[in-house]
Image (spheres, rainbow, N blue to C red):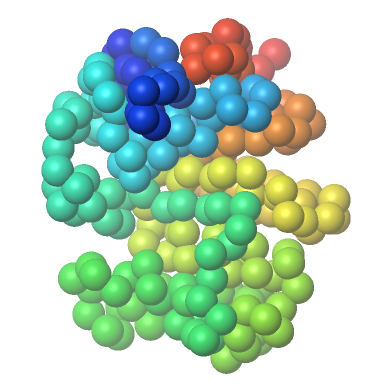
Amino acid sequence: MFKIRNLSKTYQAGEVETTALDRIHLDIETGEYLAITGPSGCGKSTLLGILGLLDAASSGEYWFEGENVAGWSEAQLSRLRRGRIGFVFQSFNLIDELSVAENIALALEYGDLPAREQRKRVDEAMARLGLSHRASHRPSQLSGGQQQRVAIARAIVARPALLLADEPTGNLDSLHGEEVMRILRELNNEGTTLVMVTHSEAHAAQASRTLRLLDGRILVDAMAA
């Protein structure tokens, strides 16, 4: 599904150049559940951003569903990721002026689905995440766990093939964190390819494969026992 070859990412600040990723090689198969771990600053979120076509590599190749997207413009990348990739972030990124249903519907705004089908998908996503009774609520009226469920519903409403989660339990207590992990496992069991950045060794152990980064390089690439 995804193939990275000799991929590097550097940032320039004045005369100082920082290497975030250093000649990464990686294959991710359809339906995999991959956890990316490592200390802060090791390149985890940078790698996730490149996988999600939110950022571009400085050099190397990234093959996304058979196409080498290295060097593509932002407009091309935006069209490619639309409907194919869902994102779940630690900070939820919900718009408080919008209701739960409206926040979820944002993920379908630039697609070509008829309005009736959009409403159906939003309703299905809310039912799936136990949010139907909160459809008209604003994010500020919800608990942290409920807000993260809204974020997951928004990420999956377009039925993406790839779901990327960046510290999805980072702002949650242990109970709500485990609930989010259960939902992510269910989605993966149904065939969604899942890549998750996490600092939690316990959560990483739930993945079928773990990647550990250090100083922008892959230190460990291990399948679950």
The N terminus appears in which quarter of the rendering? top left
In depth, the one of 225 and 136 nearer the eye is: 136
Name the residue: 32% across, 17% down: 7
Q: Position of residue 62 (x, y in %)?
A: 26, 25
Q: Is residue 77 left or right of residue 154?
A: left
Could you tell me which residue is drawn at 22 percent across and 80 percent down?
114
Residue 46 position in % (x across, y down): 45, 33
Residue 136 vs residue 19, the one in the foreground = 19
Of residues 135 and 11, the one nearer the viewer is 11
* 58 to 83, vertically: above or below: above
Residue 180, horizontal then vertical, whole percent: 69, 53
- Is residue 72 rendered to the left or right of residue 46? left
- Classify residue 115 by image quadrant: bottom left
- Quadrant for the C terminus, please: top right
The answer to whether residue 27 shows anywhere in this view is: no
What residue do we see at 29% from left, 14% from top?
5
Q: Residue at x 85, y 51 (%)?
A: 174
Image location of residue 38, percent across then percent down: 65, 23
Report which quarter residue 25 is drawn in: top left
In the depicted structure, whether residue 186 falls above or below residue 42: below
